[in-house]
Amino acid sequence: MKTIAFDASNQPLTIALFDNQELISQFETNQVKNHSEQLLPGIDQLMQDAGWRPQDLERVIVSQGPGSYTGLRLAVTTAKTLAFTLGLELVGVSSLALLAANVALADAKDTLIIPLMDARNQNVYAGQYQWQGEHLVNIINDQHTPLKAMPSQIAAQQAVIYVGATPEMQAEILTQVPQAQFAADNLPHAANLVQLARTEPIITAVNAIHQFNPRYLRLTQAEANWQQQHPEAKRQDYVEKVK
């Protein structure tokens, strides 16, 4: 199955082409640039390099969130457009699961993997994952939470590896989780998306393309401001609930 996979949930942008499980080509950048100027040209260049036509594609996999609002909207909209216009299978994957996949099974037996993304104001997007056999399993749902609240969810002496932690985050984590380890690779790689797309319950099977939306895990600032100014209004479910 010819697949295109991409992630634009944060500063890095990563795109990959697969034929079944074989990686054909990939593009990655970690520069502070507008993904709207790079995503489509990057896809086009990879397709040309592989000698693929748009009609050759059969599936599109995209990181659905959490992460940057702008990046998620761009990536999800692009994936939906490709799926609709080309009749492709559409698959959504947690952007935190994609980070967690940087920690290989061989390096993480019986180890808790905690991917982190900076959500500003001392908050993070975080999840808890663990390898069970050959499957990466979500132990605790992805969440938007204060960084200081994370250690309370970790058992004493639990082997744990953090992925995506900045030096400032690492210093804070070590004050409360002294046994914590930190992954060397903190960037997402679209090359891992095909593997994750085969793993339940991490994947999001999409039956209705128009209903596929980013998973922000919190309100946008505009939505939060509106609700603060209209307390009498019934709260709307702008953010997808995690069951």
Image (cartoon, grey):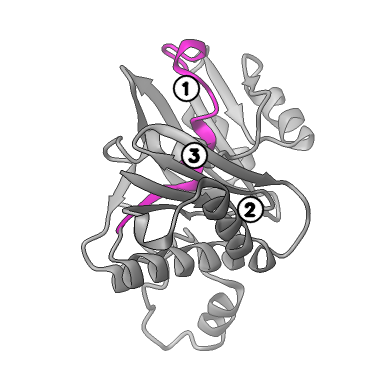
The stretch in magenta equals 89-111
Distance, label 2 to label 1, CA atoms, is 23 Å
Could you say which is closer to the camera, residue 204 or residue 192?
A: 192
Could you say which is closer to the camera, residue 34 or residue 17?
A: 17
Identity of the amino acid at label 1? Answer: Leu
Residue at image mark 2: 10
Residue at 67% from the left image edge and 48% from the top image edge: 12
Is residue 32 found left or right of 36 in the rendered image? right
Of all residues, the one furthest to the front in this rendering is 51
First in residue order: circle 1 vs circle 3: 3
Is residue 93 found left or right of 207 in the rendered image? right
Q: Is residue 76 magenta?
A: no
Residues tagged 1 and 3 counted as in contact (Cβ below 8 A): no
Residue at 69% from the left image edge and 49% from the top image edge: 122
First in residue order: circle 2 vs circle 3: 2
Q: Position of residue 141 (x, y in %)?
A: 39, 43
Residue at image mark 3: 98
Identity of the amino acid at label 3? Answer: Leu
Is residue 194 found left or right of 118 in the rendered image? left
Q: Position of residue 107 (x, y in %)?
A: 52, 12
Distance, label 1 to label 3, CA atoms, is 15 Å
Residue 67 seen in render: no
Residue at image mark 1: 112
